[in-house]
């Protein structure tokens, strides 16, 4: 069985806070830095295959968000609950996909913390959505799920057995 995800990633919007439009050099830099970040995070990851990069590398215009379609080759192990911080969030994906999704999220957190990307959404094959972002563009990652469950970065990292820190990238 293959788990298919749509991963949507927002770029940095500093250009707007400076009164610049989305065709400014700053907006283009943010668009290209997001593309580089995603390429580095996803192309070298053997767990995920990129089926479609969407508008990630568009050179005609910048995009607030780009959506990348990912495929995970997973064994049919049976249904499992996706658990973050001891809270059951979704009952829609298999055991092997749960760990892979957690690793994917953890891999993208440093981009949120650094400001290279601004928000992330994963739409699972059953339509459930998991979002993680930096609220108010501050340096604190927050999670929410389409069933209105909310978690902090500390809750998420605790579910992985990690402490919150700038080293959220370790062990990937």
Image (cartoon, rainbow, N blue to C red):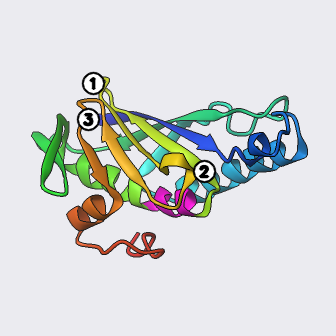
Mark 3 packing: few (<14 Cα in 10 Å), some, or many (20+)? Answer: few
Residue 67 against residue 168 in the figure, above or below: above
- The question of residue 48 being in magenta is answered with no
Q: Earlier in the sequence, mark 3 or mark 1?
A: 3
Residue 64: quadrant of the picture:
top right
Question: What residue is disc 1 on?
Answer: 126
Count of residue discs: 3
Of labels 3 and 2, earlier in sequence is 3
Look at mark 2 in the image and give the residue it sits on: 117
Q: Which residues are magenta?
A: 107-113
Q: Position of residue 170 (x, y in %)?
A: 42, 75
Q: Helix, strand or loop at disc 1? A: loop
Position of the N terminus by quadrant: top left
Question: CA gap, disc 3 to disc 2?
Answer: 31 Å
Residue, x 60% and y 40% (percent of image)? 10
Instruction: Quote the CA–CA distance across marks 3 and 1.
Output: 14 Å
Q: Position of residue 43 (x, y in %)?
A: 57, 54
Point 83% across, 39% down: residue: 19
Say few, some or many: other residues with alpha carbon within 10 Å of mark 1 (under 14 / 14 to 19 / 20 or more): few
Q: Which residue is mark 3?
A: 1
Q: Nearer the viewer, mark 3 or mark 1?
A: 1
């Amino acid at each position: 069985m293959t788990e298919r995800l749509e991963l949507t990633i927002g770029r940095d919007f500093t250009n707007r806070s400076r009164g610049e439009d989305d065709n400014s050099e700053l907006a283009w830099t943010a668009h290209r830095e997001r593309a580089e970040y995603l390429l580095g995070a996803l192309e070298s990851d053997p767990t995920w295959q990129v089926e479609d990069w969407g508008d990630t590398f568009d050179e005609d215009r910048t995009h607030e968000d780009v959506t990348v379609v990912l495929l995970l080759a997973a064994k049919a192990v049976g249904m499992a609950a996706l658990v973050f911080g001891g809270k059951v969030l979704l009952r829609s994906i298999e055991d092997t996909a749960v760990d892979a999704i957690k690793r994917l999220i953890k891999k993208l957190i440093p981009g949120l913390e650094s400001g290279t990307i601004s928000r992330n959404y994963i739409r699972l094959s059953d339509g459930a959505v998991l979002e993680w972002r930096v609220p108010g563009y501050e340096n604190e990652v927050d999670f929410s799920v389409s069933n209105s469950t909310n978690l902090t970065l500390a809750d998420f990292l605790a579910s992985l057995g990690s402490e919150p820190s700038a080293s959220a990238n370790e062990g990937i």
